[in-house]
Amino acid sequence: MLTTHRKHAAKHISCAVITVSDTRNKETDKSGKKIIDLLTKHQHQVNFYEIIPDDGDQIRRTAEKAISYEKIDAVIVNGGTGISRRDVTIEFIEPLFEKQLPGFGELFRHLSFQNDIGTASILSRAICGVRNHCVIFSIPGSTGAVALAMEKIILPEIGHMVREIHKDLEH
């Protein structure tokens, strides 16, 4: 059945990439570049890319802006998912969801645990949800976490997810 779903999955996804960091810029944003490189390598487009500080209101506004673009099917936010005082991405992304996909965060933490992170994986608050026919991922900002999330979960499923959230638009 999974093969059938992937066979009918969307092949070219229009994406937004948002990096949340007080210290990175477009030259030093290794994680944002990794996401963009992996998306384009898999024939997806990146039509929106911004680096913003760890500021809740700016995180919400930027995510809403990306979600509102008609041509954006998926938003990938990296950074600000930990437990320090400055990590507020989750508090401002999660309320945007019309539907939450808890399996994403659960699987990400499980894979992180297996991938040499061990019990420190409980510190990750990675989440995923849907709003306005757009899938939204919020993942840690480390390059290793980005590679894990992209290669093991997001890239294998993004086409299937976009196909599912656009089903009702086809009728």
Image: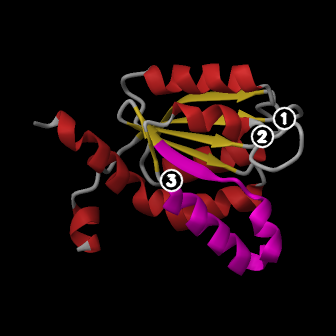
Disc marking residue 41:
3
| Circles 3, 1 touching at the beta carbon (< 8 Å) | no
Report whether 33 appears left or right of 137.
Answer: right
Q: Residue at x 58, y 27 (%)?
A: 63
The Cα–Cα distance between marks 1 and 2, rounded to whole angstroms, is 5 Å
The Cα–Cα distance between marks 2 and 3, rounded to whole angstroms, is 18 Å
Q: Which residue is mark 2?
A: 29
Type of secondary structure dominating the magenta stretch: helix
The percent position of residue 26, horizontal first and vertical second, equals 76, 31
Callout 3: helix, strand or loop? helix
Q: Which residue is mark 1?
A: 24
Name the kind of residue labelled 1 in the image: Arg
Name the kind of residue labelled 3 in the image: Lys
* Residue sticking out furthest to the left: 171
Identify whether 58 is placed above or below 92. Answer: above
How many numbered discs?
A: 3
- Where does the magenta region start and end? 102-129
Query: Who is closer to the viewer here, 13 or 22?
Result: 22
**Residue 116 within the segment the image draws in magenta:** yes
Callout 1: helix, strand or loop? loop
Q: Residue at x 36, y 52 (%)?
A: 161
- Location of the N terminus by quadrant is bottom left
3 or 1: mark nearer the eye? 1
Name the kind of residue labelled 2 in the image: Asp
